[in-house]
Image (spheres, rainbow, N blue to C red):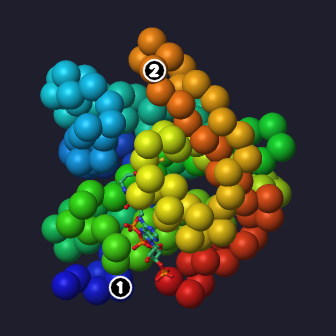
Amino acid sequence: MERLAAYNILPAGPGDAAALARVHVRSWRETYAGLLPGAFLAQMNPGVYARRWRRQLMAADSSELILCAEGAGGLVGYCGASERAGGAEVSTLYVIRPAQRRGVGKRLLSSAAKVMAARGAPSLHLWVLNDNTRARAFYEHLGGFPVEERRVSGWDGAYRETAYSWPDIRTLAAACESA
Ligand SMILES: CC(C)(COP(=O)(O)OP(=O)(O)OC[C@H]1O[C@@H](n2cnc3c(N)ncnc32)[C@H](O)[C@@H]1OP(=O)(O)O)[C@@H](O)C(=O)NCCC(=O)NCCS
């Protein structure tokens, strides 16, 4: 098994767009099979997502933080976070299945919390699909707790999501010190 030290957490740049897109599409298919419509997952196109990632990572005014996790074989995960009124919001966190349960998700999330705390965010929250029970258990394990529920926008209102909160972002930022 690859050791934790074999993964580096780095800010993503435009040159990572293609690798981010591959992880993005693969991870969505692994995570949401049986949870989101199969036809949507099947048509996800890494080329299209690579162009979106490149545009986002090249935008001069983007305040969104994108961290990626890199192993010997390339990129295995990423996390996106930005500032919102009253705190930081993590918009994405994905680790491909072979790299899961090796501390990568925790390091990505806590590293993002550390950066956002340094930017002045007092708290952190994120939204997770209600049926994504594995991710919910992970967030609860890291001290997050559910604070709000809503309908997911789009998808004809068929899905619901729950916000998890860390009222003191420093608790999550500290999690990577022990990782
Ligand atoms: C959820 C996810 C980010 C977790 O990342 P990971 O790298 O697998 O998790 P880690 O190895 O960093 O785990 C960190 C800690 O959480 C625990 N943990 C991980 N998954 C868990 C789960 N499903 N239930 C309970 N605890 C869990 C680990 O045991 C570990 O505990 P420790 O630090 O006390 O030893 C990852 O599994 C993933 O990308 N899943 C698919 C995508 C997804 O659902 N993303 C969230 C969208 S909102």
Q: In the rendered image, is residue 129 in sight?
A: yes
Q: Residue at x 60, y 41 (%)?
A: 162
Q: Residue furthest top?
A: 156
Q: In the rendered image, is residue 81 in sight?
A: no
Q: Residue at x 36, y 43 (%)?
A: 14
Tag 1 and tag 2, C-beta contact below 8 Å: no
Residue wearing tag 1: 5
Residue 146 placement, left or right of 66: right
Residue 149 placement, left or right of 57: right
Residue wearing tag 2: 158
- Quadrant of the image containing the N terminus: bottom left
- Establish if 90 lies above or below 38: below
Query: Assess mark 2: CB under 8 A from ligand 1?
Result: no
Packing grade of label 1 (10 A; few <14, some 14-19, many >=20) is: few
Residue 133 rendering spot, x and y as whole percentages: 44, 53
Q: Quadrant location of residue 51?
A: top left
Looking at numbered disc 1 in the image, what kind of residue is underneath it?
Ala
